[in-house]
Image: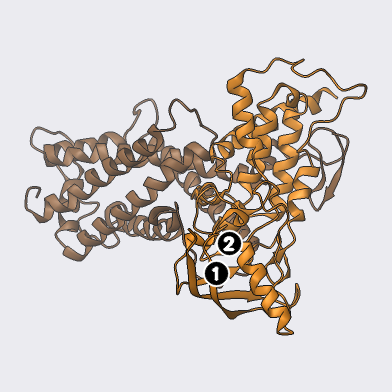
Amino acid sequence: MSNHLKNITLRIWRQAGPAAKGNFETHVVDEITDEASFLEMLDILNDKLVTEGKEAVVFDHDCREGICGTCSLMIDGQAHGPQRGTATCQLHMRQFKSNDTITIEPWRASAFPIIKDLMVDRSAFDRIIESGGYITADTGGAPDANLIPISKIVADAAMDSAACIGCGACVAACPNGAANLFTGAKIAHLSRLPQGQAERYSRVEAMVETMDEKFGSCTNHGECEAACPKEISIDVIALMNKDFRKAKFANRKDLARK
Amino acid sequence: MAQVVTSKRGPVTGTATHQRKKRPFLLDLYSTAVGKKYAMGLSGIAMMGFVLFHMIGNLKIYAGAADLDHYAHFLQTLLYPLAPKGWVLWILRGGLISMLFLHLHAAWSLTRLNRHARPVKYQSKRDYQIANFASRTMRWSGIIVLGFIVWHLLDLTFGVVNSETGKMITHPGDEESVKAVYASIVYSFQRTPVALFYVVANILLGIHLFHGTWSIFQSLGWNNPRFNNWRRGFATGFASLVVVGNVSFPIAVMAGIVG
């Protein structure tokens, strides 16, 4: 049986454009089923706004099944809202009560400029990936599956990092606006696998230095891990730091050989 | 790597390009945020070593005036006659001062970086999940402890605010006189506000150490699934040990156990 929540007050950040001055706008949702997802609740609100001839609230969303990393939203001061290990799209209204006031803000970081309302530009993450977050492809036919033996433990550890969907909640939750969890996850994912070894050290140095230009630094609060919808551990940050140190030595040695 | 991403630091590709003029290794490392965290961690370890031995050494206060004064004299004449009197102590002090400077510079520049990373704050209240009082107040606890260090040096090292500091005493059975460290500590802590400041500053030092000690493991990449659960315990234990030892001195003086 579904229950209905009544009288939900939403304080939503409205901002006309990147340079515009924004402010909170209050809307009341009179009644909503607790089976609605958070984004469905916003859809229903937007329907109402459009019917009334007002402008709909702009927010990012795509797959709505927690795997694409498009949805964002700072909900009541928590990235992706109050439920652990859940992206905003998988957050449901049953997490809230009747008469609640819910505050919704966009991610805030200089690397994530606001496009409009709750939508931010996260292409700074693409710059980090471009600088090394991949394995240079082999040419020729597709290799056979399981051609390279990888132990279950290593594969699982790599998968834990590969679970990152690049949503940016780590940056949003970090008091310093640091992207260490994101970058660490990408580095840990590739550096744990045999395919990632050839470019291991060039990757780490390049990705970390690109990250440095756009984001803050880690002070080990652990907020990113708590906000991550994929619950990626800050262990990946330690691994990145270790590989960065090793990379500085290894890359210098290689440069000297040239 | 095939792709060159050009940025204000020059082409960012690790080893693939050879164009960027490489700075000296340590400067190159220190120019990155991760490198600065290494500096924070390593200088932190050096200062942790100092506070621990400072506390342990000062426990001699419970052995009496002669014991503490002789210990202080031993530090002042460390490695004498191999090295001239006071030299080794000043070399150690020089190392400590440079570690402190490095720690402060890294903290200052990382703080600036972090402010730039979020120029517009969240307009609603944040609901922190994991960040604790210690981690949220590192800058303040650090600044207050720094202020305390200045006072502490003026009080017990240079004697600017302590008329007993620097006086000499000849203990029974001694041929030469030594600095009367014990007497100056007792004099200092008999002033209640000074003793209270000392207690408060040391509790803040403990809070700083609680987050800092744990943080070192992450910043220096010392992460091992076998030992990760011990890191918090180690940080708590280390911070508690230093605080309990240090705070015991003013309390012992005020309670009349020492002095």
Q: Which residue is mark 1?
A: A32
Percent across and percent down for residue A70 are: 70, 54
Mark 1: amino acid: Ile
Extreme bottom residue here?
A53
Q: Residue at x 21, y 61 (%)?
A: B196
Q: Tell which chain the image draws in orange.
A: A
Nearer to me, A53 or B105: A53
Extreme front residue here?
A1
Percent across and percent down for residue A235 are: 54, 36
Q: Tell me how the rendering is colored.
A: by chain
Mark 1, secondary structure of its residue: strand
Q: Residue at x 68, y 36 (%)?
A: A187
Q: Quadrant of residue A56?
A: bottom right
Mark 2, secondary structure of its residue: loop
Q: Residue at x 64, y 68 (%)?
A: A42
Q: Is residue A16 left or right of residue B54?
A: right
The shade of chain B is: brown
Q: Locate the N terminus of chain B by quadrant.
A: top right
Q: Is residue A197 above or below residue A214?
A: above
Q: Is residue B215 left or right of residue B155?
A: right
Nearer to me, A141 or B105: A141
Q: Which residue is mark 2?
A: A36
Percent across and percent down for residue B216 are: 48, 40
| CB within 8 Å, label 1 to label 2 | yes
Query: Can residue B180 be seen here?
Result: no
